[in-house]
Image (spheres, grey):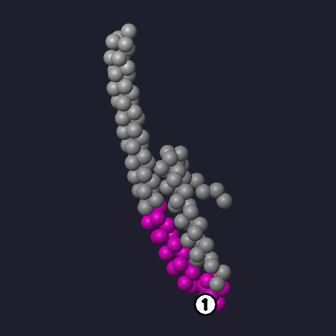
């Protein structure tokens, strides 16, 4: 009886190793693709948001010294950078997980 069971167990061990190797390979490929999509999305949005921040800073140049000083003390520029950075990071995470159907900002 052990003579019949031993080759069967050996065959199952080989197929089990093949299944594990295939699953790990597919998992690695999915992780690399998700990271790549996330990085590209983040870099693209970061570039667009840098342009938008520059546009806002240029627009704030004409508001006057007093109002600019008040807004600077309030930290409006830092707050806008935080909000836009969080938006870019959230979009990158959504793109990496594949749940980004369309980009919608709700206010």
Q: In screen coordinates, is 27 left or right of 58? A: left
Residue linked to disc 1 = 65
- Residue positioned most to the bottom: 65
Q: Please state the horizontal and vertical placement of residue 75, each as a whole percent of the image.
A: 63, 79
- Residue positioned most to the front: 2
Q: Is residue 50 magenta?
A: yes
The C terminus lies in which quarter of the figure?
Answer: bottom right
Compared with 48, 58 (above or below) is below
The part of the image, by quadrant, that contains residue 77 is bottom right
Q: Please state the horizontal and vertical placement of residue 67, each as a whole percent of the image.
A: 65, 86
- Main SS, magenta region, reads helix
Which residue sits at x=36%, y=35%? Answer: 21
Which residue sits at x=56%, y=63%? Answer: 86
Q: Residues within 10 Å of mark 1 (few under 14, many from 20)?
A: few
Q: Please state the horizontal and vertical placement of residue 2, each as a whole percent of the image.
A: 37, 13
| Of 19 and 10, the residue lying toward us | 10
Compared with 24, 60 (above or below) is below
Q: Secondary structure at mark 1?
A: helix
Q: In screen coordinates, is 93 left or right of 16? A: right
Which residue sits at x=40%, y=33%? Answer: 20
Compared with 29, 53 (above or below) is below
The N terminus lies in which quarter of the figure?
Answer: top left
Is any part of residue 15 visible from this angle? no
Q: Is residue 71 magenta?
A: yes
| Of 51 and 2, the residue lying toward us | 2
Is any part of residue 42 visible from this angle? yes
Which residues are the magenta region? 45-72
Which residue sits at x=49%, y=50%? Answer: 95
Q: Please state the horizontal and vertical placement of residue 102, each as a whole percent of the image.
A: 54, 49
The part of the image, by quadrant, that contains residue 83 is bottom right
């Amino acid at each position: 009886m052990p003579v019949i069971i031993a080759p069967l167990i050996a065959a199952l061990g080989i197929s089990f190793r093949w299944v594990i190797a295939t699953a790990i390979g597919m998992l690695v490929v999915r992780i690399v693709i998700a990271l790549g999509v996330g990085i590209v999305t983040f870099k693209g949005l970061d570039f667009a948001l840098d342009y938008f921040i520059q546009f806002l800073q240029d627009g704030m140049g004409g508001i006057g010294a007093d109002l600019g000083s008040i807004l600077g003390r309030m930290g409006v520029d830092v707050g806008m950078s935080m909000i836009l950075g969080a938006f870019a990071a959230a979009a990158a995470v959504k793109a990496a997980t594949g749940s980004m159907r369309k980009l919608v900002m709700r206010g």
